[in-house]
Image (cartoon, rainbow, N blue to C red):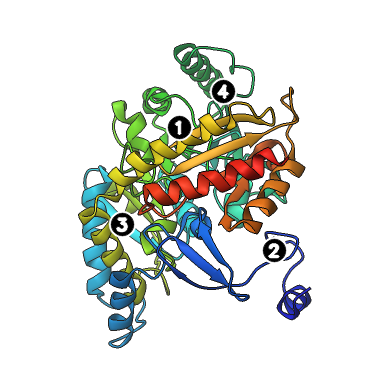
Amino acid sequence: MSSLYERHRAVAPDWLALYYKNPIELTHGDGRYVWDADGNRYLDFFGGILTTMTAHALPEVTKAVAEQAGRIIHSSTLYLNRPMVELAERIAALSGIPDARVFFTTSGTEANDTALLLATAYRRSNQILAMRNSYHGRSFSTVGITGNRSWSPTGLSPLQTQYVHGGVRTRGPYAQFTDERFVEACVADLEDLLGQTRDVAALIAEPVQGVGGFTSPPDGLYAAFRRVLDRHGILWIADEVQTGWGRTGDHFWGWQAHGQAGPPDILTFAKGIGNGMSIGGVVARAEIMNCLDANSISTFGGSPVTMAAGLANLTYLLEHDLQGNARRVGGLLIERLRAATAGIDAVREVRGRGLMIGLELTEPGTDRADPDAAAAVLEATRANGLLIGKGGGHNTSALRIAPPLSLTVAEAEEGAAILEQALRSL
């Protein structure tokens, strides 16, 4: 046991999770690779939980951070902030939401917390609909709406939440249906729920469930939901903390796979936009964003340094078409993994889109989750120079693969080979 690990255990909460039996200290990174304190190099297929979106030590971002830090690091939202306004303008234009306003936070949790505040204030209701198997953050309000018991340590909440079917395509009572019938059944479930619920404020949904194991419904489900919600005046909050900025390859935002009924009323984002810097935020129509009738500021949200990083990162992302790279390289990686795991009984499903890929592990020949197998694969890939994540409902038995969006074909093949070897060693 390293001395740093012992020191960590002495001062950090017991519930602060660490990967690996012998946790590693990452000291530096470059591109898609990172190094630990012992000098071992790893191909990074998790990117600090989908946060190092572009590349480690991207020169354009580190230069922007250094230059801004040399001028002024902090001022708060009580003063005009040019980088914040410039990034807000770009995000508003990209969001697809008409007459959009943008509020910056320091994390996805805080962004979702703000979205819930806006929705409940606008609708004058504390009734929330969320998806089963969902995850929206670790604050008191976001834990209260999270539909994944592994990440919900208390049932107490300022909100009354009910959970809707649809976020998981291949489990649950509708799994055997065709996509069309699946959507119809989920819409019927929503209609039934609304018939017994008064004055719901909003439905919050991840287009692809992140911590839930990269599960998603058929394209168009949330558009079908939106048509129902609109009849009741209920808002749609798209949690894009993990799906935003082109990670899914096919779309810039995850909601666009469900955009037939228009954009969401509120969109939340975080993680990848800062490429490691602490940026989160909310986009909403002006009438919703402006509904609060009390003073509010953000001390650290929209800080000049993080906004400079976000501007540089977004510019690089768009100029180098990293969404297109996620579609091309991610598509190759998914097919490579499906081919490699075709004969492995422990792999129940390979799913995902772009560079957001999940492998669900179960006890061979059953639908019973196998968290021990997931932990074993995590250890085996680490031993051979690859870092991946895990998650999922049903006892955390899904492997999560989400490399930086600049991943090359050669790196995708390298990672797939290591992962295949680990899976075959089960």
Residue 82, percent from left and from top = 22, 73
- The residue under label 3 is 102
Residue type indicated by callout 1: Glu
- The residue under label 2 is 16
Q: Considering the image in quadrants, where does the C terminus appear? A: top right
User: How far is mark 3 from mark 4, CA to CA?
Assistant: 32 Å
As drawn, the label of residue 200 is none
- Residue appearing at x 64%, y 22% in the figure: 172
Residue type indicated by callout 4: Leu
Dot placed on the residue nearer the N-terminal end, 2 or 4: 2
Residue 203, percent from left and from top = 48, 36
Residue type indicated by callout 2: Leu
Is any part of residue 211 visible from this angle? no
Circle 3 sits in a helix, a strand or a loop, which is it?
strand
- The residue under label 4 is 193
Query: What is the residue that sits farthest to the bottom in this orientation?
Result: 70
